[in-house]
Image (cartoon, helix red, strand yellow):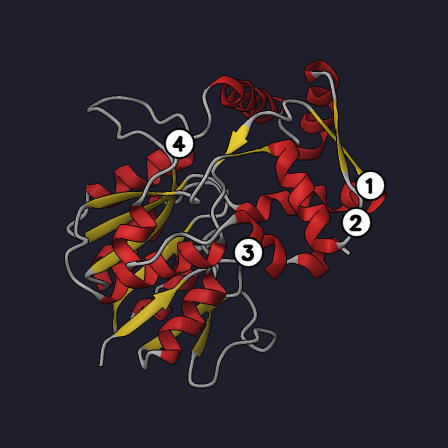
Amino acid sequence: MSTILVTGATGNVGRHIVSALAAAGHRVRALVRDPHRASLPAGVEAVRGDLTDPGSIEAALHGVTSVFLMWPGLPVSPRVVELIAEHAERVVYLSADVTDLRDGERPVVFHQEIERLIRNTGLSWTFVRAIDFAGNTLGWADQIRRGVVRLPYGQAARSLIHERDIADVAVRALTTGGHERAAYVITGPESIPQAELVRIIGEVTGRDVRWEELPAEVAREQLAAAWASAEFADARLRAWAGFVDTPERVTDTVERLLGRPARTFRSWAEDHADDFR
């Protein structure tokens, strides 16, 4: 039986991948920083490793045929991709909604850089390009508890995806054929204004929560401080402004791959209601 290595194995997406693979009888190896503290399903092998230290993951790759790779905003290390290519046959990379780079074009975001590194190996690859996580709305939790979410662009319509759908697509790509050299853009089933997302969370949690429109210039200072990056804050604000007139796109990729519709934002909010209480 082949072994599948899962990076980010205890994270929001990785833990669901590990559980699904183990439940289906696959041999799973979980890359974690502290194997003694990792809570994993029975039969899953925990190995110590850190993507910031390429040497630490080499042992974890021995005997591995497939890898689920996610890169949580860390500096890119080409050696990690080289090591995966030396040991494995297939990689499924959790990317974002990015465009393919032309020859000689410089990457704008790190996902493009990693995708290019993977393309240049002999690996069979699949890119799962998640448009944006529903879980990012957990950043509103403190404001939800206070009853008011103050942000700009309440009418910016988002097509956020449930982390379980990301995991299910990744598992399908890891365990079935026909996904080589595919770049799947996956979204939720509908595009919903941010103010409506807040209303849904309030309804699910039994709270009276409202949206209060905040001027973009005021929000920029707050977001730049929270994210420690004025550049990232500016990029997010530009995107939200664009989604007011042109809602974030919706794809049918999840339904085509899994044979069922993507989970709704309401279902995500129900799964995470306690996180907002």
- Label 1 to label 4: alpha-carbon separation: 29 Å
Q: Residue at x 21, y 46 (%)?
A: 182
Q: Nearer the viewer, mark 2 or mark 4?
A: 2
In the rendering, at what x and y percent does residue 64 appear?
Answer: 27, 70
Foreground residue among 251 and 55: 251
Whether pointer 2 and pointer 3 mark residues with C-beta atoms closer than 8 Å, the reply is: no
Viewport quadrant of the N terminus: bottom left
Q: Secondary structure at mark 1?
A: loop
Q: Residues within 10 Å of mark 3 (few under 14, many from 20)?
A: few
**Which is in the foreground here, disc 1 or disc 2?**
2
Label 2: element kind: loop
The residue wearing badge 1 is 147
Residue 170 as seen in the image, left or right of residue 221:
left
Total label count? 4
Can you say whether 126 is above or below 154 in the image?
below
Q: Give the spatial CA distance, label 1 vs label 3.
A: 21 Å
Q: Nearer the viewer, residue 71 or 128?
A: 128
Crowding at mark 4 (Cα within 10 Å: few <14, some 14-19, many 20+): some
Crowding around mark 1 (Cα neighbors within 10 Å: few <14, some 14 to 19, many 20+) is some
Whole-angstrom CA distance, mark 2 to mark 4, is 29 Å
CB under 8 Å between discs 1 and 2: yes
The residue indicated by pointer 3 is: 267
Kind of residue at disc 3: Ser
Q: Between 92 and 162, which is closer to the camera in this rendering? A: 162
Residue ID for mark 2: 207
Image quarter (top left, top right, bottom left or bottom right) of the C terminus: bottom right
